[in-house]
Amino acid sequence: MIDQFPALQIMVTLVAAPICVMIRNPRWSWVCAMVANTFAFLVSLVLLDKVLDDGVIRYAVGGWAAPSGIEYYIDAMNAAVLVLVSGISAVVLLYAYRSVAKSVPAEKHYLFYTAWMMCVTGLLGIVITGDAFNVFVFLEISSLSMYTLISFGQDRRALTASFRYLVLGSVGASFILIGIGFLYAATGTLNMSDLAVRIPESESQRAVLVAFSFLTMGVLIKSAVFPLHAWLPNAYTHAPVAVTAFLAGTATKVSLYVLLRFFFSVFGKDYSFGQHLLNGVLLPAAVAGFVLMSLVAIFQNDLRRMLAYSSVAQVGYIVAGFSLATQSGLTAGIVHVVNHGMVKACLFMAVGCILYRVGHVHTPSLDNLLKRMPFTCVAFIISGLGLIGVPLTVGFVSKFTLIQASLEKGWWAIAALVLLSSLMAIVYVGRVIEIMVFRRSRETGPESSGMSEAPLSMLIPLYVLVGVSLYFGINGSATLEVAGQAATYLLGGLQ
Amino acid sequence: MSQLIGLYSYWIVIVLMMAGLYIMIARYNLVKKIIGLSLFQTSIFYLYITMSKIEGGTAPILVEDADYVYSNPLPHVLILTAIVVGVATSAVALALIVRIYESYGTIEEDELKAIEAAEPDA
């Protein structure tokens, strides 16, 4: 049984999707999705435990052995990402039931949960697979269902946001497809561990370089690295807020995982960062991203749009960590993938609670919200502090590691810019907190004085995730240890 | 010169790919954008099929003959999958376009932008 867990990891949610279509009833299709997702989460926990104890797991799909068949390859890195994706999806799905009930017509619910299940399947598949072409297939499964999920938004602008994401996302995925094609032409294999061996030996190094460029561009579009982030702010702003919480916590993180996998495991650290232009491109883009996007976030009046820009900025921190290409830099990047995934999901869930009761999230009109929705506001403030990187929160753990890593390499300017951008985060998060907590309500009608908290079925998942992120903030060594082990694997290449 | 002519398949790939990208960037009509996207994806299919072909190769069938020359079947199989993905992408995109037309009354990008700019945030 336990040998088949890598297959079960994606099969359960994949099978749940058509079952949801057949059920059609909103409540029961949600139950079906919830059960499947919880099971996927448990499976990923077992896999992580097993990987940390016994090392790499390899699973031949359908019994076809590795180089010719498709192989699932699990090490500390993707086991951690599997837990993150399935965990956040499970928590947000629990939360989604009430949130979606209000914003999506009831007769479409089963389709919503179907698309959700397909999306989770795609994301988990990208992470678990050890086959380059399989990455593309799962990427398209997740992307197509993501476009669908975004278009469920109430505002009609969700449709155009989804369309723009579709065009850009398809171009990105096509670039990845071209890159994989060139890799196959140059090496004659699609298996990642096999590719890692054969790339240095390949006679056509120029084809490998072309493959490298196309793959890098494609993945950078998908992970919304500045300046290729144009699709993200509108998609996050207009999608149903539960979808945004889910995507912000998982989708871009999974693309970043693909980036890591190709840079470090397939091409190898020396190829990716040794002789090529990447050093001159990736780090400046990442740094410009986190400075400029934090600046832009300050001027946003829509809470969701502000958090969306902040997401682009946080992706900048992660990529900056990766492009240091050292043990500590990678550790910082990987830890921030997990930590930011949790924090952003919390923030968007809190925003969803506000949206549920207040009906809008126009920041200047949220005055004195603390009186009306104390629990939501407290969760928002805790996560907001995590976003800034206040000590004892997860944000502090990852930013501290990142600054340490850049100082270790002697790049103190990067460390200074990280601090500068954190100051901007204090401004944009602080502004919201100031309005929520201290600003007096302008209209003192009877309705605004009473407490109208979001339903418990939304608050409980929110607080579960806030609690988990607090735990990992106080006990930072837990995630750092896993991330450190993952970084060692990545720098050492595939075994 | 022989390289130019001998590699004509790859030239077709490049021309198709650039035409597709250009249409996506230059045309404001959403349906035309999707036509460009399809063209772009088709050029990639062509690239895969081209590289699997070798001179004198035929269909890959298991025979006793040791000198049997056949084309690499793997890229064909991969592209079958990619074609399905391409069709699904077009379907989702066209469905979105229908819904955009229903709610905005236009599918011209510049007009959509003008309408959206007039709508308040949040």
Image (cartoon, coloured by chain):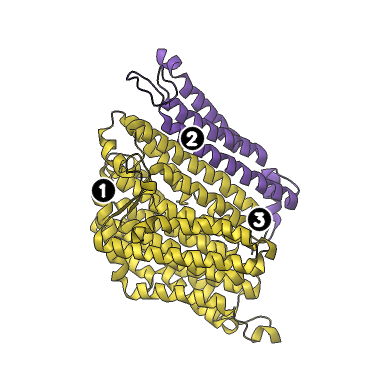
Chain colours: A yellow, B purple
Q: Mark 3, mark 1: which one is toward the viewer?
A: 1
Name the amino acid, label 2. Answer: Ile
Q: Which mark is residue B63?
A: none
Residue B15 visible in the displayed image: yes
Name the amino acid, label 3. Answer: Arg
Q: Which residue is mark 2?
A: B79
Rendered position, A370 above or below A154 = below
- At a point 58% along the width and 61% down the height, the residue shown is A113
Q: Which residue is mark 1?
A: A493
The reply to whether callout 3 and callout 2 are in contact (CB within 8 Å) is: no
SS type, badge 2: helix
Q: CA distance from mark 2 to mark 1?
A: 29 Å
SS type, badge 1: loop
Q: Quadrant of the N terminus of chain A?
A: bottom left
Please indicate whether residue A487 sits to the left or right of residue B49 in the image: left
Please indicate whether residue B77 sits to the left or right of residue A493 in the image: right
Name the amino acid, label 1. Answer: Gly
Find residue A224 and report its horizontal and vertical position in percent.
47, 51
